[in-house]
Amino acid sequence: MRKSEGRARLTDVARLAGCAPVTVSRFFNDPGRVSEDVKRAIEDAIGQLGYYRNESARVLRSKRSKLVGVVIPTLRHSIYADMVEGLQRKLATHGFSLIHNVSDYDLDEEHAQARNLIERGVEAIVLVGTRHRRKTLDMLKDSAVTCVVTYALRDDFQVASVGFDNHRAAALAAEKLLALGHRRFAMIAGITHDNDRAQSRVEGFSAALAQAGIPPAELCVREARYDIREGQAAMADLLDRAPGTTAVFCGSDVLAVGALRECRNRGLAVPADISIIGFDNLEISEYTDPPLSTLNVPAVEMGEEAANYIVQTGPGEAAPKKVELQVGFVPRGTTAAPRQS
Amino acid sequence: MRKSEGRARLTDVARLAGCAPVTVSRFFNDPGRVSEDVKRAIEDAIGQLGYYRNESARVLRSKRSKLVGVVIPTLRHSIYADMVEGLQRKLATHGFSLIHNVSDYDLDEEHAQARNLIERGVEAIVLVGTRHRRKTLDMLKDSAVTCVVTYALRDDFQVASVGFDNHRAAALAAEKLLALGHRRFAMIAGITHDNDRAQSRVEGFSAALAQAGIPPAELCVREARYDIREGQAAMADLLDRAPGTTAVFCGSDVLAVGALRECRNRGLAVPADISIIGFDNLEISEYTDPPLSTLNVPAVEMGEEAANYIVQTGPGEAAPKKVELQVGFVPRGTTAAPRQS
DNA sequence: TTGTAGGCGTTATCAC
DNA sequence: GTGATAACGCCTACAA
């Protein structure tokens, strides 16, 4: 199957097929320009030699890597995993491969990973959120790598974004709760440090309340890492510190599940005593007890749209675009009017 | 920052730093052999030029890509996402990058992706499960790419495996239920077609029951795709067809959550009327009502161990190894003795 | 510690 | 439709 020394090369295929190397190259890159006879000979030779293309050589010479990088905070939240899956699938249909890194919400780590991706020759990098180190964005610009941010929108002539308005989405949650008659609010937010999404959600929720005459000082906000246990602990704390609360907005369904659990532990009825709204619309949220009212995030679509943008934008071409996707309220069983007090 | 034509090259850095290109190369690959003075000059030059290494050229010449590929069925099940995260994190600490693909449980798709990964120059490929196309394993062997399979164990001198004994794990579930006094069993399995893990779990569960004097014919097995809704539908079907069942083993926690939901819908008490055991130990499983008894799968560790093996095994070196991780039973609230009948 | 020479496998370019 | 030539940017090998 193979030459005694190492793998077969394009040249070996050409020799066996009785043509020039460049013809074999065309066989792969522009098959229309190779006659049927030669094609067959090349196919035979490839089979006999067990030939695999050497992408490193191709990339070095052609400057087209067909490689994309993505840096996400973590794969352990399904919204990011979903986005990456959408991205990878769609890219694959266009012959692109995806290199993936997790930054653990650390922007310096993100920078280091972006640098490595550039060195690997990626044509585009997908990031999460609008907040990044200045040097990261500069690096991307200098090296002419297409950059797409997701999960948020960015008004920028250098960077494309595919996402949704976190501020607006949180405001939507507030409006739904206000419309039900709630006046005493709390929020369990994600860690806002270096996280524009978590931050925008707090601001959006607070702003909408302010507009309805509820000053920010009356909103009790507690931050928690995105896991169920932390959500539960945050809820416990909120209930202790702001016992009159009738509505809680959570920055993630994961937090909401924890909040729900704490309510149950304390014998508080949801939604009769307390209304809860989550964020993400995870698969599980339909199956909590009661089913969780939440905001639906189009995670897979974000990945797909980012892929579409990358595939359409040639390397070096700067055509930053803003693709806004919609977040919808999904009313389920954890929201109702507050008890008459 | 950059030369007018394209990116700066190693040669440009060398010229500006006043040394030979090979010294700059050593600066990156073997810094100990470069004097401090020269190092500083090189660092300056790199900064001034905004130089990024060209990995394609490095790989082409050195044959060391420091690239690993992984093909998983889907990222949308957290066990796979967890494994990939463990893999990526651990690899990153050794300077390896990870290219990732989803096959959607399609072995031909997996083959195509593995081929592309080989062409990209990966030094190793991580796959899920022991069942693959013959040609896929041959291809890996021929191209001298290290192969590691996960989520299962494989006795093979060509392929390393990092995983657990699915047959044994399922038998463990059976033993726990038998010990509680159950005699009427059912199982909601994953789709077994081309899926050795799902298949081994059915066989292991069935074999353990047989050993306890319960013939396979009395075990009612229903297959379902791994999602909550399908699990619920499968449970509905089981309850209709085998109404005397007192214990159900699910091939995944996702299926178990669906099963639990169906029991609740029908007014069946868990575990009083029916015991349920899941598989995976997802984060959510601790928070179902009642909390789900399940088998803990060391997903992150699998990824980390696979990475360790890859990092330790040089390219081309064949030292297939079997790393067996343990699956433990996690008793929670969905298992109890059956009612006296 | 540093330098010189040559080639890794492919494709761009120009020619027929 | 096909081919000859050179070059992509770096590292290995050997030498000083």
Image (cartoon, coloured by chain):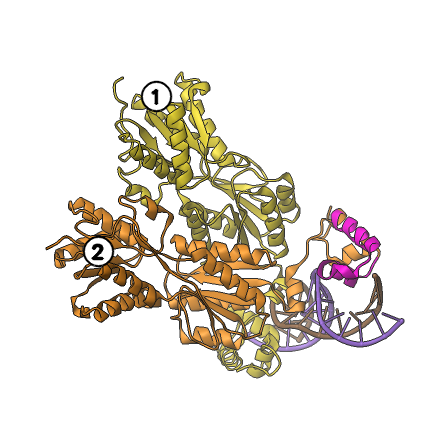
Chain colours: A orange, B yellow, C purple, D brown
Side of D8 relative to A179 (left or right):
right
Type of amino acid under label 1: Gly
Residue A103 location in percent, x, y? Answer: 40, 62
Nearest-to-viewer mark from 1 and 2: 1
Question: Quick check: can you spot residue B317?
Answer: no
Mark 1 chain: B
Residue B278 magenta-highlighted: no
**Pick the front one: B138 or B206:** B206
Residue B34 location in percent, x, y? Answer: 52, 73
Question: Quick check: can you spot residue B79?
Answer: yes
Tell me the residue that label 1 is attached to.
B244
Residue A26 magenta-highlighted: yes
User: Which residue sits at x=38%, y=47%?
Assistant: A283
**Pick the front one: A82 or B180:** A82
Type of amino acid under label 2: Ala
Secondary element type, mark 2: helix
Q: Which mark is residue A234?
A: 2
User: Which residue sits at x=57%, y=69%?
Assistant: A313
User: Which residue sits at x=44%, y=73%?
Assistant: A136
User: Which residue sits at x=76%, y=47%?
Assistant: A48
> Is the residue at mark 1 from the same chain as the one at mark 2?
no
Is the residue A182 above or below the residue A140 in the image? above
Is the residue B266 above or below the residue A122 in the image? above
Side of A292 relative to B215 (left or right):
left
Q: Which residues are magenta?
A: A19-47
Q: Main secondary structure of the magenta part?
A: helix
Side of A263 relative to B4 (left or right):
left
**Pick the front one: A117 or A227:** A227
**Pick the front one: B276 or C3:** B276
Side of B264 relative to B8 (left or right):
left
Q: Furthest-left residue in view?
A: A341
